[in-house]
Image: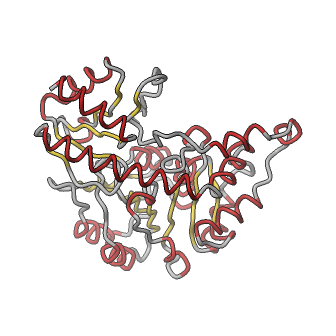
Amino acid sequence: MRAYHPPLEGRGGKIRLDFNENPAGCPSAVTKALAHLTPHEIASYPEQGAARRAVARFFGAAADELLLSNGTDEGLHLVVNTFVNPGDTVLLAEPTFAMYRFYAELGGARVAALRYDAELAFPVEATLEALRKEPRVLFIANPNNPTGSLVKLDELRAILAAAKKTMVVLDEAYFEFSGLTALPWIRTRRNLIVTRTFSKAGGLAGLRIGCVFAHREVTAHLRKAQSPYPVNVAALAAALALIQEKKFLAGTLEEFRRSREELIRGLARLGLRQFPSAANFILVDAGDRAKRVAAALARRGILIRDRSHDFGGAGYLRITIGTVGQTRALLRHLKEVL
């Protein structure tokens, strides 16, 4: 296995457009909820039943259709632990979220990797063909990270219909930005698992809380493989406070839309090729300048993500869509660097 080395250190005090977090942070209601945690609550093992019921209602699901997890990462690991034996095949399309391959390899699975095409479209036909070999699990990020590509609902229906002996995991970490979801399908499709996170639009990345949705018979199996206290008491309190903050979430999305339009126009003026994105980031082809551009921006206190290795050395940069002010600062410095 290749070790996963996210560049998490030394990011304080900089404009962080490298990890697709919420640039506005979390709402004040979250910090107030954390401040009100009592010493007794902190000293006790967490009870998550009330939080699970409230979060399920927020997403339009039943409590027994949801498992809360220590970030989406733990939810993905849980799927592999539940359904994948050593030697089984896990199917995915790359480039995509690195943890799909990571957990599959950790579980001893054989990874069958398809590729996004030159226009970064999901390989639907190749996936349908690969499903005939009955892989154990198929991971799809929708929208995909780092491409921003979106698999349409009719394409997802075809994939689920072809996945006769395959569990399809639909990672909707960026759902709030795309607006497209298959979550209601879990009641009729027992081969579907949908994951969500509070780390992106919700601004809770530092507290690590995610959601795993599936048919209640599937969640019953997943629950057997999950530790009894996967989510800490602070994360539960934060999630309960966040789901009450509809104005914060609406404001986040409005700022995102304004900033995205400004970033798209600015990148076009600079002559940088960009790809359509349904997420809160944009993938840019900077050619052989990519590494130098990312390094120069970092020296100026602006962090973006060099994803060149995902594309075999081509110069791709992923830029998180920040606040309007952050986008303007990025474009100003990017123009000077170029």
Residue 45 position (above or below residue 186): above
Q: Is residue 59 visible?
A: yes
User: In this rendering, is residue 258 above or below 193?
Assistant: above
The quadrant the N terminus occupies is top left
User: Between residues 332 and 197, which one lies in front from this camera angle?
Assistant: 332
Residue 193 x %, y %: 51, 66
Q: Residue at x 40, y 62 (%)?
A: 138
Give left or right: position of 274 versus 130: left
Question: Which residue: 28% across, 57% down?
Answer: 149
Measured as percent of width and height from the top left, residue 182 is found at 45, 71
Q: Is residue 205 above or below residue 201?
A: above
Seen at 39% across and 50% down, the residue is 256
Which residue is outermost to the top? 299
| Residue 36, x across and y down, in percent | 79, 40
Indicate the quadrant where residue 93 lies: bottom left
* 101 vs 38, nearest the viewer: 38
- Work out whether 301 lies above or below 112: above
Residue ID at (51%, 76%): 184
Residue 293 position, x and y percent, is 21, 26
Furthest-right residue in view? 40
| Residue 171 in sight in this render | no
Seen as rendered, the residue at the extreme bottom is 188
Task: Quadrant for residue 168, please give it.
Answer: bottom left
In the image, 219 versus 145, the foreground residue is 145
- Quadrant where the C terminus sits is top left
Report the number of discs: 0
